[in-house]
Amino acid sequence: MGQNTEPEDFGALIRGARCSARLTQAQLGAKCGYSASAISRIEANKLRPEYSAMLRMFEVLAIPPQQMRGSAAPDASAVATVTSRCPSDEEDAVRRRNLLTGALAAGATAIVGAGTASATAVSSGPAAGLEEALFQLPAAEPVPLARLTAQTAAARQTYQAAHYQVLGRALPGLLAAAVATRDAATGRARQQASGVLARAYVLTAELASKQHSDAAWVAADRALSAARDSRSPVPVGEASRLLAITMRRSGHWSSAVHLLAREAAQLDANEVRTAAVRTTLLLTAAYSAAAGGDRSTALALLDEAEEDVKRLPGVPGLFTVEATRAQVDIYRIGALNALGTPDEGVKVAAELSIDHMATPERRARAWTDIGRMWHALGDGTQTFAALRQVELEAPQEVRRPALRALTSDLLYGPTRVQGLREFAVRTGALAA
């Protein structure tokens, strides 16, 4: 069997079999040597595993090896082979068929250029068009720097409000105007325009990352390049954080930790703004270390960040993440989830004041990590309650690929949760 025989829709096959086997992404990853985020990218057809790892996944999920010779879009008989191992009662059979329909649709939204169905799904997604726009920006004229700064601040507010569809439509034009303004400027004005451009790219990377789009790589790299041209440490730190996130999600967690530690070491811990950026870099490094299973490094970085915020007032001026005690607690919960010890996060979650957090996007992030914690602990009722809170804070958050996958996992878990099926249909995790 050659290495080119796997189906092009490998991700949908893995997701369907994993949900059928009632394994979480973290559980499957632990059995195959991948992080939960890497499994998420594999299921979205954004990361292709090594051939040996692919065989291991088929073994763990009891997928017949002949399915590696599947077509780009598995037909109903191929899907049925995956689900034939499930309990045979009528209700579970119907629910699993619906799950696989939803899983195929969810996977399609993350694929660009994989056929008519996936192209249609992508066209309506918040990150639709970002990859094309990054390589071929629309025509734009330079604008006054003050206006460009105001437009970028407005886009930031749109992101913080979790209005991702609106942001996705605005970003190509904003990037084009920022590039034109930077290119037309000289001296100090060019440095300032570069800083604004860096932040426009940061927003692009944030949105693309939420949608599991490879545009995140390009946007993060360009954000860091523009930030360095600005000669300002704050945009450099913010851009470095996004680049490290894309590295981690591709399985390069140790490189992400190294990048973040290096950038954090260059920031002044005694100046409020740079110290706040340093704290956010430590938090992202902690989560990256946790994703790689390095518990001691993750906890040490979290403790260091916690000491930092004790010396800082609340700093609201950072672009997408604030340096506060609440942020430290959210990252601690996420890191403990990634380390496979979600029970240690229960007390942290109980003491977290989510209502006091500044933006819907951050509040939704907090509820997401709490939902993942309860899901890992096998509490379907608490998981669904957290997902409902995500929806209340930011309806477009629950339509992200990662949260639709979490909803699918919960829907076909052992616990029957009232209202979950309607939620799954409403958020796109299950076909209507």
Image: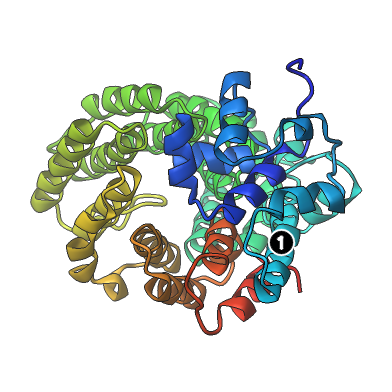
Tell me: residue 327, above or below residue 307. below
Q: Looking at the rendering, which quadrant does residue 248 occupy?
A: top left
The image shows residue 211 at horizontal and vertical percentages of: 61, 49
Q: Quadrant of the N terminus?
A: top right
Residue drawn at x 70%, y 54% is: 83
Residues 418 and 235: in front is 418
Residue drawn at x 50%, y 34% is: 246
The answer to whether residue 188 shows anywhere in this view is: no
Q: Tell me: 262 left or right of 32.
A: left
Q: Tell me how the rendering is colored.
A: rainbow
The image shows residue 50 at horizontal and vertical percentages of: 60, 21
Residues 391 and 313: in front is 391
Q: Residue furthest bottom?
A: 418
Residues 395 and 81: in front is 81
Tag 1's secondary structure? helix
* Tag 1: amino acid: Gly
Residues 102 and 225: in front is 102
Q: Name the residue beneath numbered marker 1.
A: 102
Q: Tell me: 232 left or right of 246.
A: left
The answer to whether residue 279 shows anywhere in this view is: yes
Q: Tell me: 61 left or right of 4.
A: left
Residue drawn at x 44%, y 45% is: 26
Q: Quadrant of the C terminus?
A: bottom right
